[in-house]
Image (cartoon, rainbow, N blue to C red):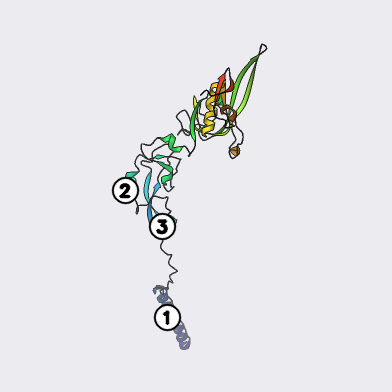
Amino acid sequence: MVASRIIIAGVAVAAAGGAGYIAKNMTAPPAPVEITQGPVAPSIATSEILVLSGDVPMGATIDGNVSWQDWPSDAINEHMVTKDREPDALEKLQGSVARLAMYQGEPLRRSKLIDAGQPFMSSILPSGKRAIATQIAADTSAGGFILPNDFVDVIMVRRGEGQGTTSFQTETILKNIRVLAIDQAIQEDEEGRKVKVGETATLELTPQQAEIISVAQQMADRLTLALRSVTDTQEVVTDEADYLVGGSGRRGTVRLIKSGVVSEEGARK
């Protein structure tokens, strides 16, 4: 009996010692973990440039829609407006007008601006081009679906009479002509309407095309604009009604328009 009690007491002491060891390990703080730091990303050099903080439609001023913003120095080119070169650019550009539509987040470029006080239409005309206005109506402008920056053909309609009958002659006198404006609108309105019915269309023409349409306006009973598909605007036009203005390059003649008929006579000295 004495031996068995000694054995039981020994087992109890061993169990108590084991429990105490386990409890001590559970409450001990965890061993520190060594953190290996990865490679540090290289810092990017930046400079401040003027960036559009809001959309600016063609013909609108940029006031309130530009601000300084950090930009990667490696991505800056000479067309951007930087604070290092022009710290007072915000004040200098007050009242400037957008030559083209610009959008939020786009770096500001001077080539897209017209200085305050300069005429807008002459500023957006490409070099060597002319702007000519011609009368239109809904029935002569694709039902009013022609918008600024669309491309059109100009069709001349003339009435002819003979032997008691009335006939009509049609001829496409100009092709692939860009529309600069409908009335005073140079783009879609802010409400996004897709139809613009106006009374005049301003067309972008070469000097000779301007002469052609000026003659056609006197000859025609009606000028009609035919809207072209956007996929056809790259077509190179090689023929137009240059006979209306003496396309052969002859000099010393006077062109006469009588009853819708063009004739030429030698100029009197």
- Labelled disc at residue 17: 1
The answer to whether residue 198 is seen in the rendering is no
Are the residues at dot 1 and dot 3 in contact (C-beta closer than 8 Å)? no
Q: Position of residue 82 (x, y in %)?
A: 37, 52
Tag 1 near tag 2, CB within 8 Å = no
Rendered location of residue 193, percent (x, y) = 50, 31
Residue 130, numbered label:
none
Quarter residue 158 falls in: top right
Residue 142 x %, y %? 57, 27
Name which residue lies at 38% across and 43% down.
65
Element type at marker 3?
helix
Q: Give the number of callouts.
A: 3
What amino acid is at disc 3?
A: Ser
Residue 258 in the image: above or below residue 96: above
Which mark is in front, 1 or 2? 2
Side of 232 relative to 22 (left or right): right
Q: Position of residue 70 (x, y in %)?
A: 38, 54
Mark 2 Cα-neighbour bin, 10 Å: few <14, some 14–19, many ≥20: few
Farthest right residue in view = 163
Q: Looking at the picture, which amino acid does disc 2 mark? A: Asp
Residue at the disc numbered 2: 88
Q: Report the amino acid beneath label 1.
A: Gly
Q: Which residue is mark 3?
A: 73
Residue 169 seen in this snapshot: yes
How many angstroms separate mark 1 from mark 3 (CA)?
69 Å
Is the Cβ of the residue at disc 3 closer than 8 Å to that at disc 2?
no
Q: Secondary structure at mark 2?
A: loop
Instruction: Measure how far apart labels 3 and 2 are at the Cα level.
Output: 20 Å
Indicate the secondary structure of the residue bearing disc 1: helix
